[in-house]
Amino acid sequence: MASPPPKLFSPSNKQECQAAVRKLSWEKVISLDAEGVQLGKHGPLTLLQIGTLDGSVYLFDVMINENKQDKKFFTETGLDTILTSTRIVKVIQSCSGDSAALYHQFGIRLENVFDTQVAHLVIEEDKGRKLPTREKLVDICRLYSKNAEVYEGKADVKLEWSKIAGNYWAKRPMTKEMIDYASGDVTALIPEVYETQKTCLENNNCLDLFAERVQEEIELDIDPLAKERRKERNFKIKMEILDEMAKKYRRQTDFASIRDEDEIKTLNDSKVEEMSGLPDVIQDLKRQSMTSFLKSIEEKLETPETFNPDRGVMYKLNDIGHCGSEQLQKEATRIKQEVIKVIIGDVQTKYNAGTPLENISAPEYQALRGLKPLSVDSPRYQPTVVALHWKIAEKELTKAIDELKADPSYNMTIPISKLRFFTNNPGVPRNPKELAQVLLEKQESAILQRVPTKYTRNTNTEELTDSERMVLGGLRLSSGNYHPVVVALHWKIALQKLDKDLVSYRAGNLRVNDGLRNKLNFYMKNRSVPSDIKQKAKEFLQALPQSNRGGGRRN
């Protein structure tokens, strides 16, 4: 018997939604999914799908228009009671993104979830796997059902939103492809996948562990401790696997010859820093793993029209950039630049200058953030790309200002050198320039307040952060009444700078300009300058040709 066509509900007719919710409230088991634009904590949820055991599908559109959610949709329709019900089982595939969006955007915490992804992982662990692989919905269906199928055009729809239309799931009216895709994701989960997994968990006494892991999945982007617990658990397992591998394999083992999936996954997923201090055989296998990864990305780059770099690709390329192999570092840097070209090309196609930052993916954000549109060596970027780059700069500057206001001891990650570049470069737009100036003043003030409590006059300047050295070294002591520790460290930095410049000058690597000559003469004439600075300035002036000593030359 054919399933009834999907029922579509919108914010414009909440009475129909309420009637549907009343009907759904009698169900004991439903399947659930959500779509959105970069769906998650910040990426907006635009559509909620519910499937029932008789094959019915309910599609709840939460968008007032393409740019605005109806924030009261769930409460005013009663859908929140379905989502938070402890009686109705919600069958979901990988619920963390849906859970984060519902919680952070609508204040709804999912209850009584049966996560088919988590069920698969627990079942595999019970069979002996230590780090089972998270599977796509189509593979979950294949593993646990003879009949369940996802929408056959799923790959094409994914390509559409990942490469062409960034706001795909916010577009209205919804197309037939959107409706078929959204419907297929819930009809595939019940009843067969759900019942097969549930039976397996019951027969193997895995329900308690399953419930614990599902709760972790629900809270993954809600409670930071949930993510930390998973990270610590996986790290411990990876270290145990690597210890066993160190005993099992000898040097010169070929990575391609390893067949154990847990060992392969551990080598692929472990960070370079996690490998520090491990036996040479493990270090060698990790290098081979990185080489294999780089080769796989190179192959995908051959068809950029279908290559969609995810967060993991950029993460691994950055990680390889910190490995001990110069050859691998160079290769990773080269491939990363090619990947960024693909990402920036997609950004140009998918977005416009007004696109909200919540609508762009993590790799896109990272690529845009790292651009240097004012560098003479950079390519000329399309206006949309440049506009989004500066929008990201504004966001991060604003966030840093807010953090510094709340906590003056906040350890800011934006370097002072970048702030000074923003304030001094005429090519920087007005908003980020003004924000950089505010942040620069606040950060300099915070550093000058912090230094006397953190250091002493005898502190070695190598103990200072780069930003602290830059602020202290650039002070004009005549413009303020500074703490003795600040003054002492300022002069230490000045002496080191003079000494370094003198060495560079004598080696022929430094041209003396008017600014440096004026500084040397100032040091010689000013009574408040320490004697060791005066002595070094005198030595420098004496090293200069007579005609280049300017005001320092005496008759």
Image (cartoon, rainbow, N blue to C red):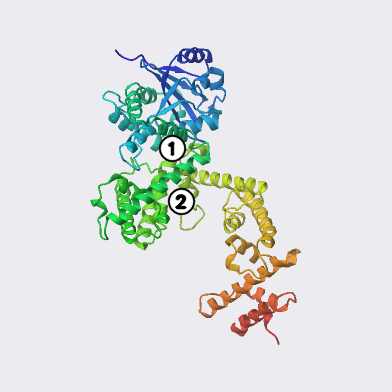
Residue 3 lies, in percent from the top left, at: 33, 15
Report how far apart the C-alphas of labels 1 and 2 lie in the structure.
Answer: 18 Å
Q: Amino acid at mark 1?
A: Lys
Spot the residue most to the bottom. 555
Say whether disc 1 or disc 2 marks the residue closer to the N-terminus: 1
Q: Which mark is residue 350?
A: 1
Q: Quadrant of residue 484?
A: bottom right
Residue 13 horizontal side relative to residue 310, left or right: right
Q: Is residue 235 above or below residue 524?
A: above
Q: Amino acid at mark 2?
A: Arg
Q: Secondary structure at mark 1?
A: helix
Q: Quadrant of residue 501?
A: bottom right
Mark in front: 1 vs 2: 1
The residue drawn where x is 60% and y is 75% is 498
Sort mark 2 into few (<14), some (14-19) or many (20+) by Cα contacts within 10 Å: few
Q: Secondary structure at mark 2?
A: loop
Q: Is residue 163 above or below residue 488?
A: above
Residue 375 lies, in percent from the top left, at: 50, 56
The quadrant the N terminus occupies is top left
Residue 279 lies, in percent from the top left, at: 34, 60
Residue hosting label 2: 380
Sort mark 1 into few (<14), some (14-19) or many (20+) by Cα contacts within 10 Å: many
